[in-house]
Structures are given as structure tokens and as C-alpha cells.
Amino acid sequence: MKQININLVILLFLIMAGSSYGQQSRVYTPDSSAYAIGDVVDGVKTGKWQFYDSKDVKIEEGEFLNGERSGVWRLYHPGGRIKAKVRYEDNLPTDYLEYSTAGDIVLAGKFSEGKKSGEWVSYYPGGQPREVRTYFANIMEGPYRLYGPYGELLVEATYKADTTHGEWKAYNDFGRVVTSGNFYEGIKDGIWKEYYDFGKLQAIENYEMGQPDSVWVEYYENGETKSTKLYDKGTPRGEWKSFHRNGDLEEVKYYKNGWQDSVYLSYYEKKKPHVQGFYKNGVKTGNWRYFNSNGYLSEEGMYKNDQQHGQWYTYYDKGQLRSIGSFHEGVEDGLWGIFHSTGLLMQEETWDKGKLMNVSPYYTIYGDTLSSGTLKNGNGLKINYYTNGKIEIECQFEGGVPHGSWTYYYQDGNVAEIGQFEKGLREGRWVFYYDNGKKEAEGDFKNGNKTGTWYYYYKNGRLRETEDHTEK
């Protein structure tokens, strides 16, 4: 909530000599940004005083009694409507009302000994309470409530020393609790609960002085457990599990000293394996296996220091060998064999630490031999084919990485996309086509990222939209 500035003009320089009686004076702030007009009797402000800014717009006005503010003072919006009313006794504010430019009350509260005290209420434009804060000596202390525009309670809490302390609850539009818990000096502590809008438990969380601790549990709307986690003063530990909606195990992993460690397993529904592997001190290590949703192995190989390293195999959807080769610290290295789903060799590739150096001729599924281009020692043209023998990609390499023109084709021979690579990254103008030969999109790349204006078309060739990818 904004700080309320009661005394807009406090330090005024009185430019006067000696004392006078009933003399109306004009006094200015040191920087002449505001001035005031009123009576001075024997050097003491008395009666009605009015304060203006440098543009002669009235800021506030009220009565002085023996040099002290007294009664109701009025503050004004620039347009002249009342911004606030402040009641003073013995030069100290006791009551405060703030108004919008439309005349609605937006804030109301009281003071004790010049400091905010008791309930301060802010309001929506229609007069409905928005926020209720409790103060003691200018400090939030006690109950707090937040309401929606239709009077619905959204949050209730307790404050101590200007921060949340004690029970805290949040509600949905239907009055049901969606979050509950406790704060200790502004920090979550103890058990916190989350609920679905219709009232069912969604999660239980445990905190110790702001840090996750003990068991955390999530639930589906049907009441089945979604996940279980274990913490020790903010550090993950032990067994973590997640489950599918039907109760089947989805994932299990283990933590040791805050790092993921030991076996890792994940499953599709109906308990079909998805991923099997190992972690050591938070990084992947050893043999990892990946399965598709039909239960067939799709990929397997070794990790070292969280990177693919050593022999790796990939498989087609029904488990037939697709490729075999080696990685070195996460990039292809050495001889790779690529196979048709029938088991026949498609092509051999030779890599040198992530750079494609040489390829064999391309062998079709029918045993025919096709040219794979001119690529040799990392330089030249490489040609890829569809299984029907039609060209899929014509791509230039330099130093073992994509460099030069690249063209992708549909199976019927029509161009699908065409552009340039530079040192392994897309560069310059690229054009993408629908299968009917009409442009789908076109634009420029810089260092592998879209840049400038890109144009997108409907399949009939009419411009659909443009997007600006210029760096802001």
C-alpha cells in the first residue's frame, strides 16, 4: 500500500520581520516548488491556510489554531476534486479518508498519537472493501484480509512487525480454501496444504524455517497419489516417486547428499518401461536404455560424466537395429553404421569428435547403390535418400560441419526448404515450401537464430502473417 503523505508542505520559510497582527502572509518552500497563504498573528500561523504548487494549483487547505493544525484538512487532486480528508487534534492526525478522482472512498483509517492504528481499509471503486490491514504505531500488526470485487474473501492472514506471522489462508471464488499454512516472521514453517477448487487435497508440503523438509505429497483430483518426495532441511534425500493417474508407478529416483544417485526408472502406463539408467553424484553414468510406448527398445548406450560416451545403439519402432556407433564426450566419433528396418546396411559414416568426415555409398532397401555425394575428409556434398530412393537432402560440408547450401526435398521431389549453413549454423535467407510448391515461410537466420522480418503464407500463397525477430 502506498505511503500516505499527510503533511505535503512542512518546511516553510517565513519571510517576515518581527511580529504582526492579522497579517496575511505568503510563504515558500526552500526550492519554491510550493507556497502557502494564510494569517500570521504574533508570528504564529492561525486561521485558514491554503497550500499551492508552483503552477498555482491548490494542494491542501485547513485551519491552524495557535500554530498547530486543527480540525479537518483537505488535500486535492490536480483537477480540484478532494483527494483526502485528514482530521487533526493538537497538530496530530486522528482520522484519514482518501478519495478517487471520481469521488469514491479508496482508503480509510485512524491514527493514535499521530501513527497508523487499528484497521485501515482500502476499497474498490464501487465501495466494496478490498484490503483490511491492522496497524499498531505505523507497523502492520494483527489480522489481514484481502477481498475480491464482489466481497469474496481471498486471503486472510496475521502480521507481526510488518511481516506475515502465523496462520495464512487463501480462498477461491467459491469460498473454499485453496492454500493454508503458517508463517514465522515472513518464512513458511510447518505444514502447508494445497487444495483443488472443489475442495479435494492437492498437496501437502512441510517446511522448517523456509526450507522444504520431511515428506511432500501431491495428489490427483481423484485422490490417487501423484508424487512423493523427501527433504532434509532443504536437501533432497532418499526415494522420490511419481505415479500415473491410475496409480501405476511413473518414475522412481534416489537422492544422496542432495544429488540424484543410484538407479533411475520411469514407466509408461500399464507398467511398461520407459527409461532405465543410473546417476552418480547428480550426473548420468553407466548404461542407459530407452523404450517406446509399445515396449520396444529405442535407444541404449553408455554415459560418462553426464555425456554419451562409448558404444550406442538406436532402433526402429519395432525394435530393429537402426544405427550403431560411438560417442566421445557427447559427440559422434569413429565409424557409424546405419541400417534399413530389414537389417540391410544403408550407409556407413566416419566421424571425428563430432565432425562428419567420410561416408560410404548409399545402399537402398532393394540392394541398389546410390551416390552419397562428394564428401571426403570433411569437405564436399552429402546426399541423403528416402527409402524409395528419392533424394531427401543435398547438403554441403566444410571441415566436417554443415557449411554452404542445403536443400530438403519432399518424397515426390518437390523442394521442402532451401538455405545456407555457415560453420554448422543456419545463416542468411531460408525459404520453406508446402508440398504443393507454394511458399510456407521465408526469412533470415543469423548465427542459427531467426532475425529480421519473417513472412508466413497460407497454402494458396496468400500472406498469412509476419513476425519481427529483430533483437530488441
Image: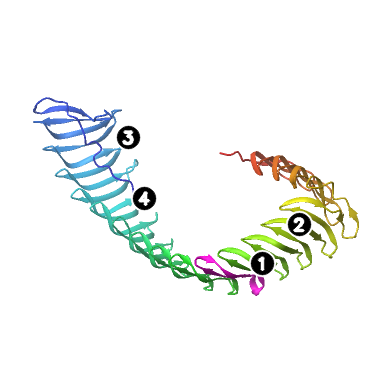
Q: Nearer the viewer, mark 4 or mark 1?
A: 1
Q: Position of residue 221 (x, y in %)?
A: 52, 69
Would you name the residue on which mark 2 appears? 334
For numbered disc 2, what is the local secondary structure?
Answer: strand
Rendered residue at 78%/62% (across/down): 322
Q: Which mark is residue 78?
A: 3
Q: Amino acid at mark 2?
A: Gly
Q: Position of residue 71 (x, y in %)?
A: 17, 42
Residue extent of the magenta highlight: 251-275
CA gap, disc 2 and disc 1: 20 Å
Question: Around disc 3, counting alpha carbons within 10 Å, would you say few (fewer than 14), some (14 to 19), or many (20 or more)?
Answer: few
- When asked about the image quadrant of residue 368, the answer is bottom right
Q: Position of residue 175 (x, y in %)?
A: 41, 64
User: In this rendering, does residue 282 appear at all?
Assistant: yes
N-terminal label among 1 and 3:
3
Using the image as rendered, state which of residue 107 and residue 455 is in the foreground: 455
Q: Amino acid at mark 4?
A: Tyr
N-terminal label among 2 and 1:
1
Would you name the residue on which mark 4 appears? 124
Above or below — where is 84 with respect to 230?
above
Question: Around disc 2, counting alpha carbons within 10 Å, would you say few (fewer than 14), some (14 to 19), or many (20 or more)?
Answer: some
Rendered residue at 9%/26% (across/down): 18
Q: Are marks 4 and 1 in contact (CB under 8 Å)?
A: no
35 part of magenta stretch: no
For numbered disc 4, what is the local secondary structure?
Answer: loop
Q: Amino acid at mark 1?
A: Trp
Would you name the residue on which mark 1 appears? 288
Above or below — where is 380 with respect to 353?
above
